[in-house]
Image: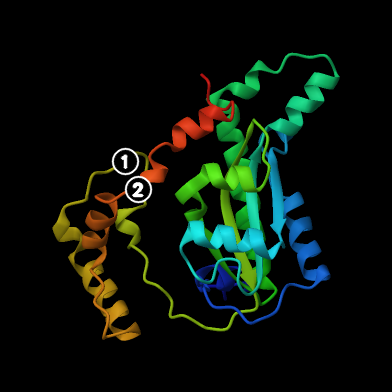
Amino acid sequence: MNKLTTTEELLLQRRTVRKFRNQSLTLEQYTRLMEVARQAPTSNFLQQCTIIHVTDMHLREQIRAICQQQYVGANGDLIVFVVDLYRNHRICAQLGLADDALNSTDAFIQGMEDTLIAAQSVVMAAEAMGLGCVYLGSIQNDIRSIIQMLHLPKLTFPLVALQVGVPDQMPELKPRMPLNLRSFENSYQDVFDLNHFAQYDEIVQTYYDLRDSSKHVDPFTQQVASKLSHTCFKRNDILKVIQDQGLCQY
């Protein structure tokens, strides 16, 4: 087998970093990351993603309270990735053209694709620069407040945030599910008998025990059961928030 390229090594060894040094990105670093996001693939060349760099400390504190994670908005930089159909709405309006398609679920999915690809491109570039990242899906805990805080207009939706900075930790590589449970050929295969997860459960349990033996963490299958049986009540109306933003009307 050929030697792995630097990019492959980076992807295969990537870790989520939640502890950062007390320093922000340099202007050069941030600009490079934004240029990477700008060059990310985009559905139909509509470029329906906008990025908001949250530098105001009061805003960062408010977002931290929503995410309920102490590292959010603390050291490093906080970046929010927004599905943005509003920009193209404004273009169409000034050209005197109808833009009913922007209210469709298809248009929203295209915008989600643009936004997630841009975010992942930034993560890859940041890690290649020796920085660390953590995705913050926790902004969805109270997405209406995020929309208000960032003054987002209709036809936009804050999808995910990133905390990016200089790592102040090197976590162990977290074991992922084996390929035979998530990669198939030609058609989907229901191979999800609990017995098939037994070995992976043991690996996950060992990983957590080695990380902190004083803190009990369930194996993977029990984590699935626990997390999917408890929901954040403010996330229950996400679809309504999306529709209130003028998105996914049909």
Name the quadrant containing residue 121.
bottom right
In the displayed image of the protein, which residue is found farthest to the right?
95
- Compared with 17, 210 (above or below) is below
Q: Is residue 56 left or right of residue 103?
A: right
* Label 2 Cα crowd, 10 Å radius (few <14 / some 14-19 / many 20+): few
Work out which residue is located at the far front of the displayed protein and give it: 58
Which residue in the structure is indicated by mark 2? 184
The residue most toward the left is 195
Residue 23 percent coordinates (x, y): 70, 79
Tag 2 and tag 1, C-beta contact below 8 Å: yes
Residue 35 position in % (x across, y down) = 79, 56
Q: Residue at x 75, y 29 (%)?
A: 88
Occupied quadrant, residue 75: bottom right
Q: CA distance from mark 2 to mark 1?
A: 6 Å
Residue nearest the observer in this picture, 248 or 243: 243
- Identify residue type, mark 1: Tyr
Between residues 51 and 235, which one lies in front from this camera angle? 235
At horizontal 33% and vertical 62% (from top left) the residue drawn is: 177
Q: Left or right: where does residue 210 sit relative to residue 119?
A: left
Tell me the residue that label 1 is attached to: 188
Work out whether residue 41 or residue 99 is closer to the camera in this orientation and state it: 99
Q: Secondary structure at mark 2?
A: loop
- The image shows residue 214, relative to residue 196, as above or below, that is below
Element carrying mark 1 = loop
> Against 214, is 115 above or below?
above
Report the front residue among 155 and 13.
Answer: 155
**Disc 2 marks which amino acid?**
Phe
